[in-house]
Image (cartoon, rainbow, N blue to C red):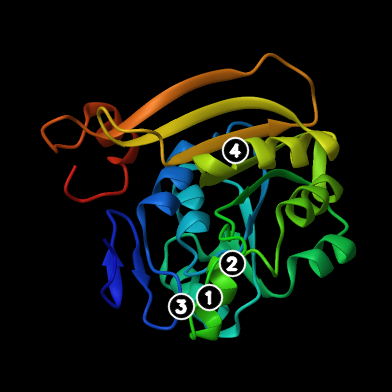
Amino acid sequence: MGRNNWFEFKQFRIEQHKSAMKVGTDGVLLGAWASVNNAQRVLDVGTGTGLIALMLAQRSNAMIDAVEIDELACREAKFNFEQSGWSDRLRVFHIDFQLFADLSCEPYDLIISNPPFFVNSLKTTNAALAVARHNDMLSFNQLVFGTRKLLSSSGRLCIIIPFSSCVEFRESARLAGFYLRNQTSVIPKSGKAPKRVLLEFSIQPGYPSANVLEVLDENGFYTENYKSLTSPFYPAF
């Protein structure tokens, strides 16, 4: 999915020939799944093409900031923002997230991220792709402690990561003072093991909920739950 130089959604278009990471299922799932209730200020960490920020702009009236360390991706996100119908509510900053967390003064109600998650694995020779895919530049600990600095007292953190990293990330979040509120395990096809997990954390304690989302049924067709979640965006649904 999304390996062309552009991707057309129902209400916006993503140009992606400069960005290392193209439109993919992970970003679409997170942008559709994360709750935007009562979110007036939102931050997208590692925005890439700007996909998730644009999805949240479509779903809310929030002011949305985005940070991106790769200059070419940052330029592309800026272009995509400017071409959208929500350009007055979208900003992108070419900056390292840790530095942004130290400098920013206004709290956010929602911080969202599809973070780099390959750890100690063979890196590509493409430098931009390596930064986008590997967490050397932004570890789980750096993400959660930076987020903790930036969130309002009622704010939330929403991410998508490999299911195999769930325990590690939850522990990092716990040490930073977060409580797990929602967890959705993503199964690529009925009968298979989960490959991704969507997580929502809050600074406020509460009882967590857990559920499962299957992308494809046993016959290889998209499930009704997946189509319902992503239908505001995919033209095919």
Say which label, 3 or 1, has the lower sequence index: 3
Name which residue type carries label 1: Lys
Name which residue type carries label 4: Cys
Q: Write down the quadrant of residue 196 in the picture.
A: top left
Q: Which residue is the site of mark 1? A: 123
Quarter of the picture containing the N terminus is bottom left
Residue 15 visible to the viewer: yes
**Is label 4 in a helix, a strand or a loop?**
helix
Q: Is 132 situated above or below 34?
A: below
Say which label, 4 or 1, has the lower sequence index: 1
Could you tell me if the residues under marks 4 and 1 are in contact, i.e. CB atoms within 8 Å? no
Residue depicted at 53% across the width and 75% down the height: 123
Q: Determine whether, in the image, residue 46 is placed left or right of residue 86.
A: right
Q: CA distance from mark 4 to mark 1?
A: 22 Å
Name which residue type carries label 2: His
Q: CA distance from mark 3 to mark 4?
A: 27 Å
Q: Give the image location of residue 167, x and y in percent.
A: 64, 35
Q: CA distance from mark 3 to mark 1?
A: 17 Å
Identify the residue at the far top of this view: 207
Quarter of the picture containing the C terminus is top left
Residue depicted at 50% across the width and 37% down the height: 197
Name which residue type carries label 3: Ser
Q: Give the image location of residue 119, x and y in percent.
A: 61, 60
Residue 55 vs residue 122, the one in the foreground: 122
Say which label, 2 or 3, has the lower sequence index: 3
Q: Write down the quadrant of residue 173 in the picture.
A: top right
